[in-house]
Image (spheres, helix red, strand yellow):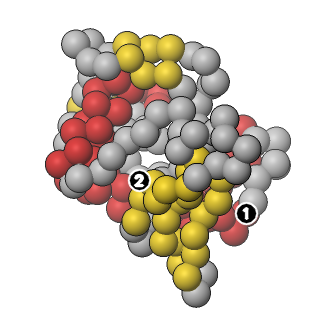
Amino acid sequence: MLVERYPEEEFWQDLWRVTDGNTNEALARLVIRTSSQCRDWMRKHGVNFQPPLSGALHVARTNAFFMGGGKALVNAYYRSAERLGVQIRYNTPVHALELHDGEFVAALAATNVLLPKPAYWRLAVSNQIVNGCGRPGEKTRAANGPRIIF
């Protein structure tokens, strides 16, 4: 819950300042303009928001706080993805993207990277792709959940 409006130009100036100007302005402004639509999408996928905790009022105008922190956010997205039939594959290198007329069709991943010529299989068939990464080797365990290796 944001308590006040966060104008585009102020958002842009803040982003410019924290990146020391090392940002793509066109892409950043696109993200800034469309960020107001994110909250409804996040709620639709199970994310619950809360008012800022006491002492956080200085950021209440520029930040939305989700209940349960980052772990709850990720768990909500995993539950939503599973309901939609998304299969999440860990430690799966993608070797190529299959495109048709410039549109994403599938990600091609090796079934066995030890083979001299890897056999490929379709990892996903979609009109969208989510590309995620993390800190290699970092291990976490969600409460009562599976181990996640980024």
Residue 123 in view here: yes
Q: Which residue is mark 1?
A: 25
The image position of residue 82, as x and y in percent, is 23, 44
Q: Residue at x 37, y 41 (%)?
A: 88
Q: Residue at x 64, y 59 (%)?
A: 96
Mark 2 neighbour density, 10 Å: few (under 14) some (14–19) many (20 or more): few
Q: Residue at x 26, y 56 (%)?
A: 40
> Which of the two discs, 1 and 2, labels the residue nearer the N terminus?
2
- For the C terminus, the quadrant is top right
Q: Secondary structure at mark 1?
A: helix
Q: Residue furthest bottom?
A: 101
Look at the picture and state if 95 lies above or below 46.
below
* Residue type highlighted by circle 1: Glu
Q: Quadrant of residue 1?
A: top left
Q: What numbered label is drawn on residue 5?
A: 2
Residue 45 in view here: no
